[in-house]
Every structure is written in structure tokens, then in C-alpha cells.
Image: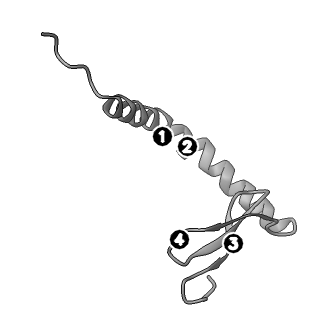
Amino acid sequence: MADEPLSLIKISSARAKESKRLMEEYDRTVYWPAIRNLRAWCAENGGHKRGNWHENGLGWSWFYCSRCGDRFEITGPDGKEE
């Protein structure tokens, strides 16, 4: 009888880990600096623009900026805003 092949979960998990490893340097040197630059530009050019609203089910809610993707107007379970 042939050996059972890897499960779909193990195959997908290995792929995700390899993708993360391959993108690590790019994310550190290109992607995240570009995101920080975009968010700084957004703050300097009128601030965040309301995009999608999100509630996490644990009492926290916020808006995502439609220009830079940052979270803002964050409200906690006690109504406290960050």
C-alpha cells in the first residue's frame, strides 16, 4: 500500500511559510517603508478619509482610511477612544 500523501492543510501551510520567507526582505525594505510613507503623506494632506467601518466582535470598532488603509477613530468596549 502506498504512503498517504500530505494533507491539504500541511501542503497549504508549507506554501504559506515559504511565501512568507521569500517576501520577508521585500516587505522589510520595500513594502512597509512604502506603507509608512503613504500614511505620512495621508496625515500631511488632509488626514484620513473614512472608508470601511469594522467591528471585531469584542467591543472594539474603527474606520479604515480609504487612502492609506490605516485604522482611526478606534473605540474600545468601554467607549474609550484611542
* Residue shown at 34% from the left, 34% from the top: 9
As helix, strand or loop, the secondary structure at mark 2 comes to helix
Closer to the eye: label 3 or 4: 4
Tell me which amino acid carries mark 4: Gly
Instruction: Provide the residue designation for mark 4.
Output: 57
Nearer to us: label 2 or label 4: 4
Q: In 3D space, how far apart are the residues under numbered discs 1 and 3 (Cα atoms)?
A: 27 Å
The residue located at (46%, 33%) in the rendering is: 19
Disc 1 packing (10 Å; few <14; some 14–19; many ≥20): few
Q: Residue at x 42, y 35 (%)?
A: 16
Q: Position of residue 33 (x, y in %)?
A: 63, 50
**Res 42 → quadrant:** bottom right
Q: Are discs 3 and 2 less than 8 Å apart at CB?
A: no
User: In which image quadrant can residue 54 be found?
Assistant: bottom right
Measured Cα–Cα span from mark 2 to mark 1: 5 Å
Compare residues 52 and 35 and report the one nearer the observer.
Answer: 52
Give whichever of discs 3 and 2 has the lower sequence position. 2
Disc 1: which residue: 24
**Residue occupied by mark 2:** 27
